[in-house]
Amino acid sequence: MSIISARHITKSFTGHTALDDVSVEIPQGSVYGLLGPNGAGKTTLIRVINRITIPDKGEILFNGKPIRQQDIYRIGYLPEERGLYKKMKVGEHAVFLARLKGLSRHEALVRLKGWFTRLGIEQWWDKRVEELSKGMAQKIQFIVTVIHEPELLIFDEPFSGFDPINANLLKQEILQLRDRGATVIFSTHNMASVEEICDHITLINKSHNILSGRVDEIRRRYGGNIFTAQFRGEEEKLRRATASLCEVMECEHDALSGITAAKLHIARTEDVRHCIAAVNEAVELRSFAEAMPSMNDIFIRAVNGTLQQ
Amino acid sequence: MKNIGLIVMREFKERVYKKSFIITTILMPLMMVLLSVAPTLIMMFAKGEERNITVIDHSGVIASQLTSDEEVAFTLSEDGDLQEALKRSLADENFGVLYIGRSIIENPSDIQLYTNASSSAIVEEKIADMVEGAIERERLKAYNLENLQEILDEVKADVNLSIYRNDDDALASSSSLFAGIVGMILGFVLYFFLVIYGSIVMSSIIEEKNSRILEVLVSTVRPFEMMMGKILGVALVAATQILVWGVLLIVMSGVVLPAVMPAELVANIEAVQGGADLTAMAASGIDTEMVTDLASLLDTAYITRIVVLLLLFMVGGFLLYAAMYAAVGASVDEAQDAQQLTTPITVPIILAFIVTTLVMNDPNSSVVFWFSMIPFTSPIVMMARIPSGIPAWEIVTSLVLLYATFVVMVWLAGKVYRVGIFMHGKKPTLKELYRWMKY
């Protein structure tokens, strides 16, 4: 079941098209990565999902039904560019934002106090926002994004500007929210950050959805039967032993440890077992694994692929 | 709707709890009082030093009629030689020399004032007045009529016009001059509020846009709600300020002024308020004009009426202008960029302010009437007209037009706002704003 179905979304602004017939299915309970270079249209898609921007064409379904204004209260959105009123007290500000998300004053107070205690920031309650450091402000923004316990969380470039400690904290909190049943959408141009936590992704480039699916499937699809073998021994021996089974793409010898890493392309899946056996015979095998291409590699290949079409 | 309420309250709290708001709200009336008394005070303390003027009178009749006072002292020159007198006057550092020609009675221009330093308008006027009186008396003397001066004094009449209105319940209304002055003050207060509070809306939207708080709010609050919340919040602040001032004024007129004024004056005022016969009062030597003016100033009902209307026009005018200022604020990144876009907003305000000066001459002229109906100028101009006593239908029509225009303007501004708040780094032109409206 998809919590969000974006169907054939098209949105153009004066002068350029931000989204061109983009469809995305976001399964319930997933951590969904929305990837693409800057200016690809990710933020516009998020704004369309949030009902901030009205699409020219297409529709958004929320839990199978066209999204309504009330559904917004079931979404938590942390925008890429985020700010707070500098002159307000932290606690007062958090209550204000929480109430805008539909909580009663009492409910907001109870939940916020809980979060503040959990993150060990109770002493900030009466400080002014302008006294907070950037990282502190980010914590507050994160809390108010999730305070109304939304079913769907949308983070636009969440790690940009977060220091590594806060980024890690954020990651942990996000995974916990997922474990409690929330769906999370990430938008980022930083591919590496996605690999660890996303289970589904969509690649957006130049207003188009160029690749969608489960991360492991996509990797396999783009993996192309490449394996790495780490061994101790002579490279020549390995080449001779596996000549009929696979092609050795590259070999790297680490003089310090004496271990060589070889990248092998095994054309037929049934040859993998034989290949392992052959390598094992020829050299002292340390490890043999399928080489997963990085998201970055996949992204570049996908973009090039669309360019060729 | 709940969201608008939350935003209004936040705006209101942020501004009203500020020290500067409390200070200006309380200090402003004091400043106003000071400003209105200041000219009198300055006149009292800054009296010019005595000016010595040597008089050379070849006619022989004028000099004796020039009377010295604490500002000007006249000394008659014995020899009547101008050159000599000038030289001496310079040496003594006197003000100058007044030379009166032989034929001054026939030719009133035969008179010159030589000054050693820069002249003074007050002194010049004083001399001209005195010489004029002297010449007139001399000319009358030439007719050789007995007791002419006494006859003239007896004939002299000082008209004290008491004004009543037919269409009003009030028996005596204040003089037009008084109404005109009150109108000017009200017009100015409105002008001041529209410009100051309008730009507060604009700059705070620019600030929100730059601090990216809008991006955080926009997911749960619709842009239109955000804009309305901001406008209404600031309007509430302005209304609070007017209300505080209004209450201060009512207390002043109802309690403080009667307490400090002479008992006799208060009795007269009460008589006027009670519907006493002004003609009879005037006959008994009371300055009825002043008494009626004071009577309306002390009439709590009159002041309350004005304060209520002021609130209505101020809120209406503010909402209209704030919507425009909000649209401009949403479409620029920095206050400096707003200059070009605010011109179409400030022109009608300034125009309205200029028209208020015409109200004093005739509060019912057609120019003034139309400017008090057209929504963009109506708050300021109508407010200036109201103290003169305007038919209720005119006020109601003007208010309806004003609030209707506000609804249309807010709808247009909302469209600009919605697009504008996400536009960064590019300064839009008026043409682009128009395109955003059609979006």
Image (cartoon, coloured by chain):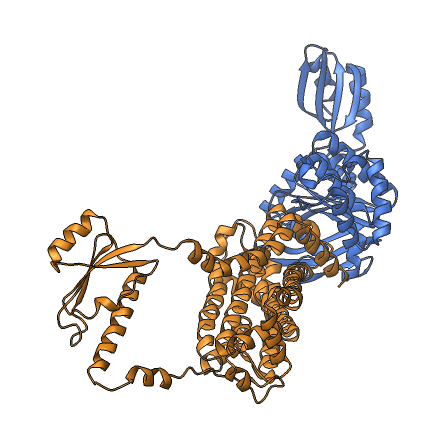
Rendering coords of residue B358 (x, y %)? 44, 75
Residue at point 55% right, 82% down? B281
Rendering coords of residue A2 (x, y %)? 81, 53
Q: Is residue B6 left or right of residue B387?
A: right
Query: Residue pushed farthest bottom?
Result: B166
* Vertical comparison of B173 with A189: above or below: below
Rendering coords of residue B195 (x, y %)? 53, 61
The hue used for chain B is: orange
Query: Residue pushed farthest right?
Result: A180
Q: Is residue B306 left or right of residue B365?
A: right
Rendering coords of residue A118 (x, y %)? 85, 36
Q: Nearer the viewer, residue A208 or B348?
A: B348
Residue A129 visible in the current orientation: yes
Q: Nearer the viewer, residue B352 or B136?
A: B136
* Vertical comparison of B195 with A149: above or below: below
The hue used for chain A is: blue
Q: Nearer the viewer, residue B341 or B355?
A: B355
Q: Nearer the viewer, residue B361 or B413?
A: B361
Residue B412 visible in the current orientation: no
Query: Residue pushed farthest front?
Result: B146
* Vertical comparison of B223 with A107: above or below: below
